Image (cartoon, rainbow, N blue to C red):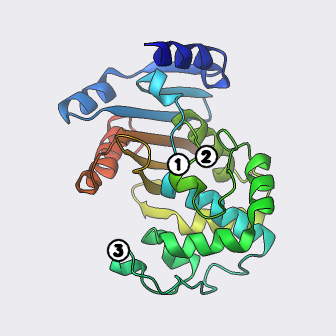
Amino acid sequence: MKRLLSVVIMLLASNAYALDWQDSLEVGKLFSNGGVQGTFVLYDLAADHLIGHNRVRAATRFIPASTFKIPNSLIGLSVGAVKTLDEVLPYGGKRQPSKEWEQDMGLREAIKISNVPVYQELARRIGLERMRDNVARINYGNGEIGTVTDRFWLDGPLKISAVEKTKFLARLARGELPFSKDVQAKAREIVRLEQGNGWTLYGKTGWADADPPGIGWWVGWVQKGDRLYSFALNIDMPQVSDAAKRNELGKSILKILGVL
């Protein structure tokens, strides 16, 4: 009870409540019908308006896990830790949870399969000081990366809320982050997922299994004509077999909100 109260007080004082928020009954029904606990936020940039489900959780920070591969890519390219999206990085030769990760590859390929050891190598090449400086420059979540260069987005202390995610991704989508236009364009390129009738979907998943009971992320944005919508979903995901729920629920929400 004390923890919940402190969270509410913190939220009321934070910029997470600076934008207008609209609860969506339709989105709430999708969560309840699927038996899923979590939140979804859609940021309509033209209207400067948020719509979603579970406002308190939307402003609560969680470990970003593999969604941090987006800023990791931006920072790595910006500081020259890699020169191109296809420069091959070593995975290290150790046995991995996924056989797909047991190969050297560039960022273009690595982000598609969420290759953790390749992105850990990228973080080590960036180094703790440059990483800390750049995480602060982009105002990413709590900005805390601790002292372990290649684990802070997997185990903490770095945390970010769904609302903060939508703001960060909106800046990337519009090319407004403190990186070159070329670097931002490359980061957008590698997270483009699919196109439909007048829209293009960008996104990245994550699973913060170090954040009990396990948090599943799906974040991104949709360019629809001249309108731009960034979004962030996180759900309780205690086991990897629940992974498909992230994209399935997220896409259903985007469709019901008329974005896809």
Q: Are there few (<14), some (14-19), or many (20+) residues within 10 Å of tag 2?
A: many
| Amino acid type of the residue that numbered disc 1 sits on in the rendered structure | Pro
Gap in angstroms between the C-alphas marked 3 and 1: 20 Å
- Upstream in sequence: badge 2 or badge 3: 3
Residue bearing mark 3:
98
The x and y percentages for residue 15 are 67, 24
Horizontal side of residue 94 vs 142, given as left or right: left
Image disc number at residue 64: 1
Residue 201 seen: no
The residue that label 2 is drawn on is: 158
Which of 164/196 is in front? 164
Q: Identify the residue shown where x is 68% and y is 50%.
A: 146
> Looking at the image, is 74 positioned above or below residue 91?
above
Label 2 vs label 3: CA separation? Answer: 24 Å
Q: Give the residue at x 61% y 25%.
A: 16
For the N terminus, which image quadrant? top left
